[in-house]
């Protein structure tokens, strides 16, 4: 895949790897637009497991007739209940991509992150390397096909109706809507297509001749890398970020939320809730009672995202440079 001219690394606050991950994700999203097909009507409706919205989904934004406006939605615990990457991992385990020993190691890393509330660099690196080794040598098209099956098996019934309505409001206003997630970009693209969204920004893994090499392009699309991806896509699509909206549940996405003129905290964790209140951002919570306490933990962040999602290893086709 040829690199686009606008994908030039920026020498600002984000690390070089974050910039590389963000710009690679934006390039992948642009390339995927040509292959997106309209979703079938039955795939758009949430399944019976989807929880009911806790409040009406009537945003003060968007404003129709703003061609340079768009919306960016985090995926895990924002659009989808729980971590999409975890659901994908379940599907791969069912298909014997890895054994119980691997499963237990990833589960321990996820539990450690939840309990510690912080990212351990050694755990993140171990999870990343182990997950990429699982998919190394597999064909991209093979995992794409499996991804479609796994969406139907585990993800379709996990979409938050309230957030889905927010996304639809942007679409009805004639605006583009993008998922922005640490999940592999092809997994994210499958979900975006099924929901009728414009496209997705996600973690990009390298492939050569349609086969995964076991390496990432940059780093997982997490934290500052998400902001870099949104900034790069906005430049490519001629978007005015001051007119755009962004939605997330996690304090890790504050860099992305801070880029836009209309930030929203959806099902927020404690850190994001405090920040949103301090900044006067709008909050919405579609969880209730004990369920909110359980899934309010940032399962999509850090090690959890890497262990669950890079485990899937699905990403855009990339040639060795």
Image (cartoon, rainbow, N blue to C red):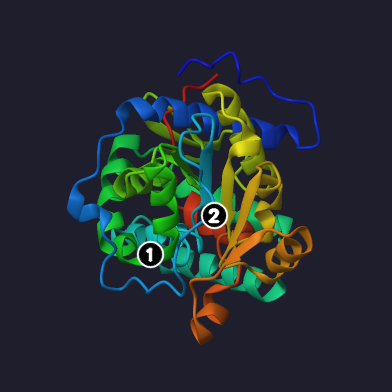
Please tell me which residue is depicted at 36% across the width and 40% down the height of the picture. Answer: 138
Residue at disc 2, secondary structure: loop
Closer-to-camera residue (18/260):
260
Quarter holding residue 109: bottom right
Mark 1 surroundings within 10 Å by alpha-carbon count, few (fewer than 14), some (14 through 19), many (20 or more): many
Q: In the rendered structure, which disc, 2 or 1, sits on the residue that comes first in sequence?
A: 2
- Residue at numbered disc 2: 60
Please tell me which residue is depicted at 71% across the width and 47% down the height of the picture. Answer: 258
Mark 2 surroundings within 10 Å by alpha-carbon count, few (fewer than 14), some (14 through 19), many (20 or more): few
Give the percent coordinates (x, y) of residue 34. 34, 25
Closer-to-camera residue (309/127):
309
Give the percent coordinates (x, y) of residue 289. 52, 86
Please tell me which residue is depicted at 69% across the width and 24% down the height of the picture. Answer: 9
Q: Is residue 160 visible?
A: no
Give the percent coordinates (x, y) of residue 244. 58, 40
- Residue at numbered disc 1: 161
Labelled disc at residue 187? none
Q: Is residue 307 visible?
A: yes
Give the spatial CA distance, label 2 vs label 1: 18 Å
Q: Is residue 86 toward the left or the right of residue 307 in the image?
A: left
| Image quadrant where one finds the C terminus | top right
| Image quadrant where one finds the N terminus | top left
Q: Is residue 258 toward the left or the right of residue 67 in the image?
A: right
Total tally of numbered discs in the picture: 2
Quarter holding residue 121: bottom right
Q: Is residue 219 toward the left or the right of residue 176 in the image?
A: right
């Amino acid at each position: 895949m040829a690199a686009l001219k606008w994908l030039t690394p920026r020498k600002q606050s984000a690390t070089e790897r974050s910039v590389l991950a963000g710009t690679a994700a934006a390039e992948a999203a642009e390339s995927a637009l040509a292959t997106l097909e309209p979703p079938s009507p039955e795939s758009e409706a949430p399944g019976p497991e989807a929880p009911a919205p806790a409040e009406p989904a009537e945003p003060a934004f968007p404003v129709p007739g703003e061609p340079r406006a768009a919306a960016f939605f985090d995926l895990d615990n924002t659009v989808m209940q729980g971590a999409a990457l975890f659901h994908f991992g379940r599907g791969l385990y069912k298909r014997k991509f890895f054994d119980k020993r691997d499963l237990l190691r990833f589960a321990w890393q996820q539990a450690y992150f939840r309990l510690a509330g912080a990212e351990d660099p050694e755990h993140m690196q171990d999870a990343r390397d182990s997950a990429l080794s699982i998919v190394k040598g597999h064909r991209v098209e093979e995992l794409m096909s499996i991804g479609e099956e796994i969406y139907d098996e585990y993800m379709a019934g996990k979409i938050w109706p309230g957030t889905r309505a927010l996304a639809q409001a942007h679409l009805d206003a004639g605006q583009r809507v993008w998922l922005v997630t640490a999940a592999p970009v092809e997994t994210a693209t499958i979900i975006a297509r099924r929901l009728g969204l414009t496209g997705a920004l996600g973690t990009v893994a390298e492939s050569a001749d349609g086969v995964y090499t076991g390496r990432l392009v940059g780093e997982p699309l997490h934290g500052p890398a998400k902001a870099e991806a949104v900034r790069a896509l906005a430049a490519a699509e001629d978007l005015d970020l001051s007119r755009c909206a962004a939605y997330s549940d996690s304090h890790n996405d504050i860099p992305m939320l801070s880029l836009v003129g209309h930030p929203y905290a959806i099902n927020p964790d404690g850190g994001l809730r405090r920040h949103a209140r301090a900044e006067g951002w709008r909050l919405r919570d579609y969880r209730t009672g004990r369920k909110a306490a359980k899934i309010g933990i940032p399962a999509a962040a850090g090690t959890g995202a890497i262990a669950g999602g890079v485990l899937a290893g699905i990403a855009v086709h990339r040639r060795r440079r």
